């Protein structure tokens, strides 16, 4: 391995660490305008605000995990076009991360205290998926986004009816996730075995149940 290759590898590791630290700490900026920016803040009871905050904290954790997954999958992708797709999807997910963080602040709440743990676990899962080959890695995205779509639809049902700011954010997130899943499928993502899908749902259930409170 040449000196240039070693330097490039070190630079990439530093950038990866920096992106991970920013995702976990919440130091992110959106590329697109917040879909809730023109909507008024509706009056809510303390119980409703706390419920909205819990749901948006779960969504913020999901975006922390998305950053970790795409980071790992891009790092270990075998094909350059697949790697670039993961990078692009990760950049788009940064918008979601920034929007949910902003909404948590508006609701006088905070991100999950366990974000470093969620990030590390998701990075490991992304690396395992990527090592199984690009088709399986893309298939992991397809299944992840399928489950996230269902999860976000559930949140649209659970959010207080008057909380239009949170609803606008969640709706745009859901639409973006559908697009990411469709793109991954078009690029050759394969259907994952049923036990893997069930395992992913089980992990997601633990994460969402914990993040609502912590």
Image: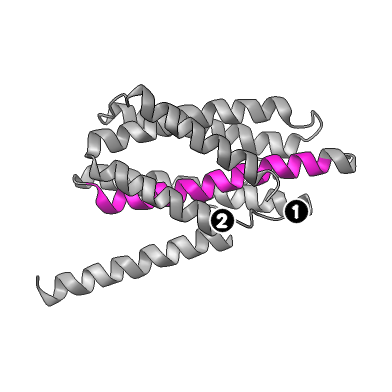
Q: Which residue is mark 1?
A: 109
**Which circle, 2 or 1, is nearer the viewer?**
2
Instruction: Please tell me which of labels 2 and 1 falls first in the chain.
Output: 1
Labelled pair 2, 1 in contact (Cβ < 8 Å): no
Up/down of 45 relative to 189, above or below: below
Q: How far from the left and from the top, in percent, is residue 38?
A: 73, 42
Q: Residues within 10 Å of mark 2 (few under 14, many from 20)?
A: many
Q: Say which residue appears at 68% left-offset and 43% top-offset.
A: 212
The image quadrant of residue 174 is: top right
Q: Residue furthest left?
A: 1
Tell me residue 44's x, y (percent): 87, 39
Q: Which residue in the structure is indicated by mark 2?
A: 115
Task: Please say whether residue 69 is one of the residues in the magenta stretch.
Answer: yes
Q: From what the image shows, is residue 16 above or below residue 200?
A: below
Q: Nearer the viewer, residue 170 or 196?
A: 196
Q: Position of residue 36 (x, y in %)?
A: 69, 41
Q: Which mark is residue 149?
A: none
- Between 125 and 43, the residue placed more toward the observer is 125
Residue at x 32%, y 67% (from the top left corner): 13
Position of residue 57 measured from the top left corner of the image (x, y, whole percent): 66, 46
The answer to whether residue 20 is visible is yes
- Image colouring: one colour
Membership of 64 in magenta stretch:
yes
Element on which disc 1 rests: loop
Determine whether, in the image, residue 132 is placed left or right of residue 34: left
Q: Secondary structure under badge 2? A: helix
Q: Which residues are magenta?
A: 49-77
Give the Cα separation between the discs numbered 2 and 1: 15 Å
- Residue at horizontal 26%, vertical 42%? 82
């Amino acid at each position: 391995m040449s000196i240039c290759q070693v330097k490039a590898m070190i630079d990439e590791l530093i950038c990866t660490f920096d992106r991970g630290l920013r995702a976990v700490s919440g130091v992110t900026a959106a590329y697109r305008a917040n879909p809730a920016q023109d909507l008024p803040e509706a009056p809510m009871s303390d119980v409703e605000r706390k419920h909205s905050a819990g749901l948006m904290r779960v969504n913020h954790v999901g975006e922390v995990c998305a950053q970790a997954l795409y980071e790992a999958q891009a790092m270990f992708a075998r094909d350059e076009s697949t790697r670039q797709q993961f990078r692009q999807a990760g950049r788009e997910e940064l918008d979601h991360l920034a929007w949910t963080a902003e909404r948590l602040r508006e609701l006088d709440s905070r991100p999950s205290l366990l974000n470093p743990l969620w990030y590390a676990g998701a990075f490991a899962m992304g690396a395992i998926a990527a090592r199984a080959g690009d088709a399986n890695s893309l298939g992991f995205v397809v299944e992840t986004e399928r489950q996230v779509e269902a999860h976000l639809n559930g949140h649209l049902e659970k959010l207080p009816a008057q909380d239009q700011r949170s609803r606008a954010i969640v709706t745009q997130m859901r639409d973006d996730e559908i697009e990411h899943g469709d793109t991954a499928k078009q690029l050759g993502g394969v259907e994952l075995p049923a036990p893997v899908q069930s395992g992913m749902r089980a992990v997601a259930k633990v994460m969402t149940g914990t993040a609502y409170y912590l």
